[in-house]
Image (tube, rainbow, N blue to C red):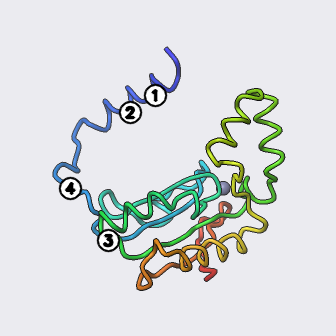
Amino acid sequence: MPALREHIMEASKRYSNGFKHKGLASPPSNHFIFVTCMDARIDTAQAFGIAVGEAHVIRNAGGSAADALRSIVISQQLLGTKEIAIIKHTKCGMDGLKNEVVHATILRNLGIEAIAEVKSRNMIDFVPISGVAQGVIDDVEFLKASPLIHKDIEVTGWVYDVETGSTKRII
Ligand SMILES: [Zn+2]
């Protein structure tokens, strides 16, 4: 059996046995949104102190606010979240990456039809970062300027250090 299928089946058996989170409400109880990178080294529950049911955690390559915007709007408008933290991290693979490199890789691995799909879906910008701290500042400013984010919503920006486990405020 493929490894992931087997992994999920075993994890589900373990986790559902003695499951303790029955009856939780859908809206996050802390009213927090964390936007962070999909990087496998970030344990969001431990590093940012998030228990089940407390917060929305939106993850994508680079912890991009633009990429997360659809989920942020649903979270705020339908599920009552009130504060947003953008948390990027040291040694991020998106830092210094160029769109052209992503496009060339897609072309090489998947062919010309895949590039056409990227263009038709408006995904030409894979939102690489030039400097993690600057990326945080840019994303906080992007959200504060967006008409989709209420002016009273607090948006802060942070960098998580994958070598020390600490998270420091940037803005
Ligand atoms: Zn990253």
The residue identified by callout 4 is 24
Please give the name of the residue rendered at 34% of the width and 32% of the height, measured from the top-left corner. Answer: 12
Q: Which amino acid, by three-letter code, is at mark 1?
A: His
- Which marked residue is nearer to the observer: mark 2 or mark 3? 3
**Position above or below: 144 against 104:** below
Instruction: Give 162 or 4, whichever is nearer the viewer.
Output: 4
The residue identified by callout 3 is 30
Please give the name of the residue rendered at 77% of the width and 29% of the height, measured from the top-left corner. Answer: 112
Q: CA distance from mark 2 to mark 4?
A: 21 Å
The residue identified by callout 1 is 7
**Position above or below: 145 against 107:** below
Q: CA distance from mark 2 to mark 3?
A: 27 Å
Q: Quadrant of residue 129?
A: bottom right
Looking at the image, do the residues carrying marks 1 and 4 touch, with CB atoms under 8 Å apart? no
Residue 57 image point, x, y percent: 44, 59
Among numbered discs 1 and 4, the one appearing first in the sequence = 1
Q: CA distance from mark 1 to mark 4?
A: 26 Å
Please give the name of the residue rendered at 57% of the width and 55% of the height, measured from the top-left corner. Answer: 42
Q: CA distance from mark 1 to mark 3?
A: 31 Å
The residue identified by callout 2 is 11
Q: Which amino acid, by three-letter code, is at mark 2?
A: Ala
Mark 4, residues whose alpha carbon is within 10 Å: few (<14), some, or many (≥20)? few
Q: Image quadrant for the C terminus?
A: bottom right
Among numbered discs 1 and 3, the one appearing first in the sequence = 1
In what element is the residue under mark 3? loop
Among numbered discs 2 and 3, the one appearing first in the sequence = 2
In what element is the residue under mark 4? loop
Instruction: Give 114 or 3, whichever is nearer the viewer.
Output: 114
- Which marked residue is nearer to the observer: mark 1 or mark 4? 4
- Which marked residue is nearer to the observer: mark 2 or mark 4? 4
Mark 3 C-beta closer than 8 Å to ligand 1:
no
